[in-house]
Structures are given as structure tokens and as C-alpha cells.
Amino acid sequence: MKHSPPRLGTTRLVAVDGPSGAGKSTFAKILAEQLNAQLISTDHFATWDDPTTQWWPRLTQALDAVAQGKTGRYRKTDWSQGFPCVAEGDEVTIGPQGTIILEGFSSARKANATRLSLAIFVDHGDEATRLERAVARDGENQREHFIRWQQYERGWFAVDETKARADYVVTSS
């Protein structure tokens, strides 16, 4: 990691990407603890209706501030009432620091590549296994959302070539 140069001003931005239910969040949490890094999740932005697009400028605006040596800010998505009742939640600050871990689907997207010091793709389990993990974590009432999400992920990863561009691919938990 120390051989990966900072590309977000003086901060290293590490993306932990991969499909739902693959273990990204667990992997990223452990990595953030080991590196004493701030952990940010794309779940702070995405919704079932908007997995990757409309929210991206909110994140890049906060990251632009960090790149300039300033504190970035954004409001995370509040999922507490369940879909479709998502709302704007608490404010999160991102300070320019040694390392920031950006975890979640689409975090290592091509549009973010020039900011990343490192891209990690977590790909543990086949699609059916990942679906069952995600449903076990978030509830049976989310199954249909996850099935649609997985369809979207397949298309996204094929076009974005996320796994092929990753610096590391993690295939076990």
C-alpha cells in the first residue's frame, strides 16, 4: 500500500468494489481498521432506483474538496425506513488524511480511476450464493431488489471492465 502514490491530493483513495453479497463491506472494514483509514460506502449514496449515476456528483464534489486539502462533506442516504422511503440522512465529513477506503458497488469505476491509489475487486461466491448472503443480511423482503440489482451489476461490470482493471482480485472471505 505504501508503494501506491496518493492521487487525491495527499490522500490515498482505495476502492473496494465487487458484486452484492461478495464480502466487500467486511473486507473493507478490516482493511480500514488495519490502515487507520476512514471508510466511506457507496451505500451512503445509492438507492435501488439509482445504483450508480445521479448520486455520483455528490461524492465527487466531496472528494474534490479532499484533493484540494479541504474537508469534504455529503449527506448520506437514510435507508432506516426501508425502500422506497429513502431520505437524506446525516452529514458525513471526509478529511484529507493518509488513506480513505471507498467501499461498494461502482467505487472503482473508470470515472474514478485517476483518483484511485488502489482498486480491489472482491468476488467471493457465485451469483446464487451472493444473493442468499445479501438476503440473509438485509431480509427476505429485499430479494426482488437484489435480483434486479444483480442484473444491473452484470451489465455494469461488463461495460466498466471493473474486475479486469483492478489491482487486486480477492476471491475468498
Image: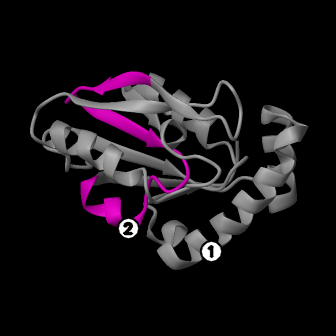
Q: Which residues are magenta?
A: 90-115
Residue type for callout 1: Gly
Residue 101 in picture, x, y percent from top left: 40, 37
If the image is split into quadrants, where does the N terminus sit?
A: top left
In terms of depth relative to the viewer, which is nearer, 43 or 130?
A: 43
Residue 108 in picture, x, y percent from top left: 43, 57
To which residue does mark 1 refer?
A: 155
To which residue does mark 2 refer?
A: 110
User: Would residue 36 be seen by someone viewing this image from the given angle?
Assistant: no
Residue 107 belongs to magenta span = yes
Q: Is residue 99 above or below residue 114?
A: above
Residue 162 in picture, x, y percent from top left: 50, 67
User: Would residue 60 be seen by someone viewing this image from the given angle?
Assistant: yes
Q: Is residue 55 above or below residue 30?
A: below
Q: Regarding mark 2 in the picture, which secondary structure is present there?
A: helix
CA neighbours of label 2 inside 10 A, class few (<14), some (14 to 19), many (20+): some
Residue 139 belongs to magenta span = no
If the image is split into quadrants, where does the C terminus sit?
A: top right
